[in-house]
Amino acid sequence: MKRILVVNVNWLGDTLFAGPFIKALKSGYPAASVAVLTHPRCREILEGNPCVDEIIAYDEKKEHASLSARLSLIFKLRKKGFDAVFILRPSFSRSLILFLSGIPERIGYENKKSGFLLTRKIPLPAKEPHKADYFLNMAKSMGIDAADTNYELRVSGEDAEKADKILRGSGVREGEGFAVINAGGNWDLKRWPFENFARLGDEIVDRFGLRVVLTGAKKDIELAGRIKGLMRNAPVALCGATDLKTLAAIFKKARCVISNDSGPMHIAAAVKTPVVALFGPTSAFMTGPRGAGVSRVLWKDVGCEIPCYKLSCLDNKCMKAISVSDVIEALTGILS
């Protein structure tokens, strides 16, 4: 294989999980050029990856929603002359695009909806593994050594300078130790109560003498305000102030990151910052942190089936079961 295309998944955490697979693919075919077709929001995660030679944006709900835009993409892929494509997530629409693009070898997991469009069907694992292993199994099916299961994220000197500028501008002194709290999440049931984060923030200041920095997207500004309003020790709120790579650089400078199960939690693990990950309705066995640094997963069995996708749940007892003292105990272990 001289030219390989990888069709990526749509989320930040899953993109990091795909990293070990891409690394294994590059080691198995060192002379090959590897391109990744991905959602625009995942581009930053892939930029700077030495195993990725090209990034091709694909947004099926916006930029490529129309038939003409998809035909244009098909012609673009045809011109690139890929020898093989690995489809990381079964998708009829994407598999059809790749079939019409004339890519001769189309490799993916066996499935009823789009399996007939594949030239090589990989049997599904008997038991659903961690997402990183799910992707790596594709490389193993091709006879490629896939022993490295840790994902990573490269932070440039420019990213580090941006992070320093933001931190200094927010009052964090050079050399001052700080802990990051990432209280957001892509759905509410994955979020630890904000009042717990506020109590935790004050405990971090009192017990460890660390400054507290709140991170998140623009949509988390209100959440950060609630946490800040309950704290005795004013935290630094940076929600919406960073791009992904600058956020990664801030995480890398932190003593630790405490986060719900989310993309930023995986970014922190990817830059090897000690992480305390708070899990409730999702399974740490399938989507827990996989970076090479220290991580502690907190999860309490409250009798519910995991993973749980009951968005109508009014209790959220799985997240409420994790106490502030549980988090402090985990932090004591990783900061000592």
Image: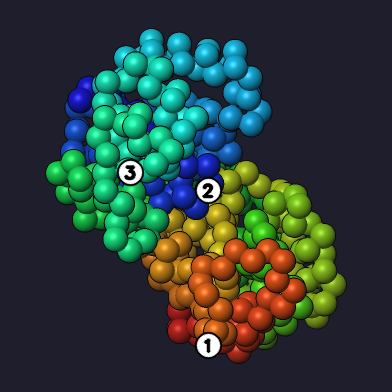
Q: Which residue is mark 3?
A: 109
Q: Residue at x 22, y 51 (%)?
A: 146
Q: Residue at x 19, y 33 (%)?
A: 29
Badge 2 marks a residue whose secondary structure is: helix
Instruction: Determine whether, in the image, residue 151 is placed left or right of residue 159.
Output: left
The kind of residue on which mark 1 rests is Glu
Instruction: Determine whether, in the image, residue 188 is placed left or right of residue 130.
Output: right
Instruction: Determine whether, in the image, residue 103 is placed left or right of residue 76.
Output: left
What percent of the width, then of the height, locates residue 32?
23, 27
Contact, CB < 8 Å: mark 3 with mark 2? no
* 10 Å crowding of disc 3: few (<14), some (14-19), many (20+): many
The outermost residue toward the right is: 229
Badge 3 marks a residue whose secondary structure is: strand
Residue 20 in view here = no
Choose between 284 and 182: the one closer to the eye.
284
Q: Residue at x 42, y 63 (%)?
A: 286
Q: Quadrant of residue 69?
A: top right
Q: Which mark is residue 12?
A: 2
The kind of residue on which mark 3 rests is Tyr
What percent of the width, then of the height, locates residue 77?
41, 17
Q: Earlier in the sequence, mark 2 or mark 1?
A: 2
What percent of the width, then of the height, locates residue 299?
52, 79
Alpha-carbon distance for marks 3 and 1? Answer: 41 Å
